Amino acid sequence: MAEERSLNFIEEIIEEDIREGKNSGRVLTRFPPEPNGYLHIGHAKSICLNFGLALEYNGKTNLRFDDTNPVKEDVEYVDSIKADVKWLGFEWAEELYASDYFDQLYELAVAMIKKGLAYVDDSTPEEIATQKGTPTEPGKPNQYRSRSIEENLTLFAEMKAGKYPDGAKVLRAKVDLASPNMHMRDPIMYRIKHAHHHRTGDAWCIYPMYDFAHGQSDAIEQITHSICTLEFIPHRPLYDWFIEELNLFPSKQYEFARLNMTYTVMSKRKLLQLVEEGHVEDWDDPRMPTISGLRRRGYTPKSIREFCERIGVAKRENMIDVSLLEFCIREDLNKSAWRRMAVLDPIKLVITDYPEGKTEMMYGENNPEAEDGDGGREIPFSRELWIEREDFMEIPPKKFFRLGVGLMVRLKNAYIVKCESFVKDAEGNVTEVHCTHIPESKSGGDSSGISVKGTIHWVSVPHAKTAEVRLYDRLFQVEDPSNEEGDFKSYLNPNSLHIIETAYIEPELAKAEPGVGYQFMRKGYFTLDKNHSKADKLVFNRTVTLKDGWVKK
């Protein structure tokens, strides 16, 4: 009997709400990204949580874009976010935008003014910050706080009509300037921004702040469980205050720990810096922690969902080792990726007693780990083969179970060969390894009685295709680059990308498609790069090595 999984704290809250009949047992969550950048692995955790909870409790999830800052937002980001959510395997109930509610939010702000709970302030941002006080000293009211309701209504309407320039006035909530919670000290509700909006165009020149737009959007949609990360805990009293004063649907906010991962930065601002300053190719660079970068590198939706499931939902911040994410993709690709042979650092092997011009088709399994079997493929074999340079040594040490003069090894899916000699060029580099083969040792029908400890992969020289191979490593050299002294970019790993311009691959790999994972035997898991591959030049990205190469010293 399978062990029953314990509930996380949000599941416990939802189950109690259902037992008490809250919201008629209905569960409606939302995923509310701001379209000012590409989603990263931290957002994947939030996506899996919000959509996963809705699926678990027969509910729904809205995708709502928090598009209240037109200066930073773009349709490109909207499209990328929708593609990422779908790729992860989720479908939203409704596609919504905070800008859908601009008229309603404006009317709600007017209602706050009419209740005497909001006022137009002409102070500069610096003056407002000073007037708010400090965590140990209460704030001080300014002369604008006592404006009449009629004056505030007139000024706010004039702000909306475009009468004032950016920064001239703001609308503030009248809450409590002595509150120990700085977010409650008359927060800004609206600011003036004469900027073109990606959906509303130039219809608006005032835009709501997050703290006003977010809770009211939740309430308008009747979201039952508004789930966000821990940094929004201080915002929750304000979230509740607006909803209560406006007598709206009582959406409730719950906070969980955001994802922090080693050798990674999760700040969209810092990721944007990496893109704009050319440290990476783009948002979907395979070294980036973005969902599009992980997808291009060869990560699967299943592996990311499994990763999010394993790290769980906590109330306290912690650092997750990136090796867990790598473990999840290895586990998935080990079961799903087809095995293929590719030689990345080639040296020629000549079987001197094998007939010249002869081609023999060998049989190789696609994936021996596949539960339901998936057939196999034919691999052309000939007299001349490419092998890895590291599989030969002039003076092999003891327990070297590959090739050296006098040593025998099995060629994967083919014959046992014995190394007889080698050839060097004028610079002293080994260029060819000469072997003889044992005809009776063919894989699948070996009657030679000879046992060897080593097996190496190969690619037939006359049948080989060429490809560029990109070996990716961690983008940063230190575990927590954001917490190190100085500029986080000074900790970038200079060896995060190594390009092999000419590798030899077996013919079957010429049929590779982007998004499909392949195991290059003994070398790691790879996928075809969707951006750079062409029919006459295949480019493969390494998703992950076969084993964790970052062993802590």
Image (cartoon, rainbow, N blue to C red):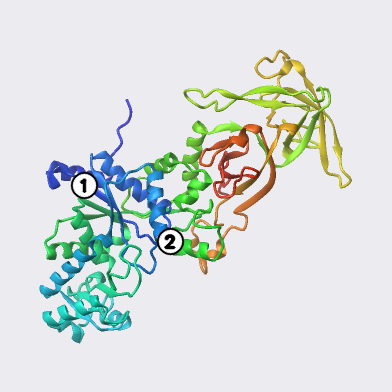
> What whole-number distance in Å separates the C-alpha atoms at marks 1 and 2?
29 Å
Report whether 248 appears left or right of 421. left
Q: Can I make out residue 519 in this image?
A: yes
Q: Residue 410 placed where, x, y %?
A: 71, 25
Q: Residue at x 24, y 65 (%)?
A: 102
Q: Quadrant of residue 512?
A: top right
* Above or below: residue 479 compared with residue 210: above
Q: Nearer the viewer, residue 423 or 459?
A: 459
Q: Name the amino acid type tagged 2.
A: Ser
Residue 443 image point, x, y percent: 67, 19
Q: Which kind of residue does numbered mark 1 sit on?
A: Ile
Determine crowd level at label 2: few under 14, some 14-19, many 20+ residues with C-alpha closer than 10 A.
few
The reply to whether residue 483 is in sight is: no
Q: Residue at x 62, y 58 (%)?
A: 494
Task: Give the answer, above or below, for where 59 lies relative to 315.
Answer: above
At 81% from the left edge and 33% from the top edge, which residue is drawn? 433
Badge 2 marks a residue whose secondary structure is loop
Residue 150, percent across and down?
Answer: 11, 81
In-image side of 482 versus 540 (left or right):
left
Camera-nearest residue between 330 and 314: 330
**On the rendered structure, is 352 left or right of 61?**
right
Residue 242, quarter of the rendered image: bottom left
**Which label was assigned to residue 267?**
2
Q: Position of residue 229 (x, y in %)?
A: 32, 56
- Of the 4 image quadrants, the one containing the N terminus is top left
Circle on res. 288: none
Local crowd size for mark 1, using a 10 Å CA cut-off: few (<14), some (14–19), many (≥20)? some
Q: Nearer the viewer, mark 1 or mark 2?
A: 2
Q: Which residue is mark 1?
A: 13
The relative height of residue 50 versus residue 449 in the rendered view (above or below) is below
